[in-house]
Image (cartoon, rainbow, N blue to C red):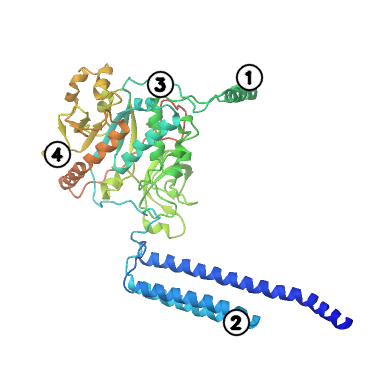
Amino acid sequence: KKKNFGSVVYCVWFLAPIKEHIQETVKMEDREARRKRKEDAKHLKRKRIEDSGGIRPRSKDGEDQNVTKETKNVSSTTQEDHSAKSGSFKNSRNDSRTQNNNNNNNINNNRKKNSRQTNAPRGKHRFGRVMERVPCRNKPRFSTLSIALPGSVVSNCQTRELKTQLVGQIARAAAVYHVDEIIVFDDKLSTERPERAFYSSRHNRDRRQEASRRQEDNKPKDKDNEQQYEEPRKRSDPHTFMARVLQYCECPQYLRRFFFPMHPDLQFAGLLSPIDAPHHVRAEESSRYREGVVLDKKGAKGSLVNCGIRSRPVEIDKVLTAGIRCTVKLDPKVYGSPGKIFGTVVSPSAPREENGTYCGYSTRLADSINAVFDECPFEGGYDLKIGTSERGDQSVDDESFSLPNFRHSLVLFGGVAGIEECVDADESMKIAGSESRKLFDEWINICPFQGSRTIRTEEAVLISLARLSPFVARNAEKAVNAVPSKSKEVDVEFSDESPSDESSDDNDDDSST
């Protein structure tokens, strides 16, 4: 009896780990089977959504039957898996493999049926993605649209972050409605407020004092090295601040490090939403036109330009000064071919005049409201001047409202007090603010019967551009019919004496933006 009892104990002690190992392997296979069923279900659901064109398929005739079949297959597999546990370990393993294979075959058959039933196009209405290309009219546009607004509207914001957000809204509105030029003028009414922090305490004051003390200690004491030490850049006035942020938003991302060094005005520029205009191309995008910066290198025919193509500079047909921005026309076939890329320098207005492609806006600073009209960069000036005021003599809602034919139009916005106060503050103007109507061809009340006492400038820009957009589009079609189809190609001349609007040299931050 003692020997039999000892042998039984020995068998139990020896077989216990084997039993536990078998149980663990069965549990692991159950987990693997459940995980695989979940993955198959997710994959099937994702496939059905893609086949339906990005729209979640609802219960239709024929689809419910497929769903019920799939649920029956899943339930049958679960029952068979539970029944396999009672059998031997080898049989359960073989059964689970055959069942999974059958299950995958049934799912693939159901996918084929669903793909046959849903014939929706693949590239249409896919949620979760941004459109790959900006819509284009594919018609040449020879007319331009400019807006002018005072930089004093930025002074009404309390912090630099709010100022940056305000300018970003204006940049977004200008890009959406194809604005070609933004003029920031000085209305002589800006009152710069000291920027206040949201949180101030004795602890923060001590930290600021300690930081300033460290900065003074780091200054070189030698007279020779004293000239090399650069003082921190001062904050710009409201007009320069607005112009700099507007230019930063318009510049493509791969060119910003060349034209915009570190500056206090761009401290919160990273929080802005990108305008994502057509000239903000991706690295792999096969675009016909690209913005680039001229490098300090030359090829066989001309200069090399960085156009945002990875490790492949573009060789242009002319020799230009290094550091300036230019527009390059490329053949889309060169993107897929190896070797050097050759391009042609064209005017910044070439994409617009060829097929109406919008390529951003230019920014201009004006010393006064009178300089907005006198310093017009277009030949012949603005032939249509529109003033916006709540005291306008006509409204967009009028049935007889229409815009005359124009080549270069200008929409001017006032500051906090309106255009009348801007005219009164400008000493170069010979008329009073009450006679501001004489400066414009159209004096329009964009939003009659407004529900608020005031409309902010950034709101007025968005409302005005939205309501005037259909009238501007009609005029653009008329201008295309008026211009002859075959126009002479004008050679673009580049002068080294006159600086460009954007230069990589940042010698004078306050005067040039």
Report the side of 396 relative to 59 (left or right): left
Q: Which mark sits nearer the N-terminus, 2 or 3?
A: 2
The residue singled out by tag 2 in the image is 94
- Circle 1 packing at 10 Å, graded few (<14), some (14-19), many (20+), is few
Residue visible at 69% across and 75% down?
A: 22
Residue visible at 10% across and 38% down?
A: 400
The residue singled out by tag 3 in the image is 192
The residue singled out by tag 4 in the image is 402
Q: Which mark sits nearer the N-terminus, 2 or 1?
A: 2
Q: Quadrant of residue 125?
A: bottom left
Q: Quadrant of residue 447?
A: top left
Cβ atoms at labels 2 and 3 below 8 Å apart: no
Kind of residue sitting beneath label 3: Glu
Cβ atoms at labels 2 and 1 below 8 Å apart: no
Kind of residue sitting beneath label 4: Ser
- Circle 3 packing at 10 Å, graded few (<14), some (14-19), many (20+), is some
Q: Which mark sits nearer the N-terminus, 3 or 1?
A: 3
Tell me the distance, in whole angstroms, between the alpha carbons under discs 2 and 4: 80 Å
Question: Mark 3 or mark 1, which is nearer to you?
Answer: 3
Tell me the distance, in whole angstroms, between the alpha carbons under discs 3 and 4: 40 Å
Q: Which mark sits nearer the N-terminus, 4 or 1?
A: 1
Q: Position of residue 81 (x, y in %)?
A: 56, 77
Tell me the distance, in whole angstroms, between the alpha carbons under discs 2 and 1: 86 Å
Residue visible at 48% across and 39% down?
A: 257
Tell me the distance, in whole angstroms, between the alpha carbons under discs 4 and 1: 68 Å
Q: In the current view of this chain or complex, which residue is farthest to the right? A: 2
SS at mark 1? helix
The residue singled out by tag 1 in the image is 223
Q: Is residue 322 visible?
A: no
Q: Position of residue 110 (x, y in %)?
A: 41, 75
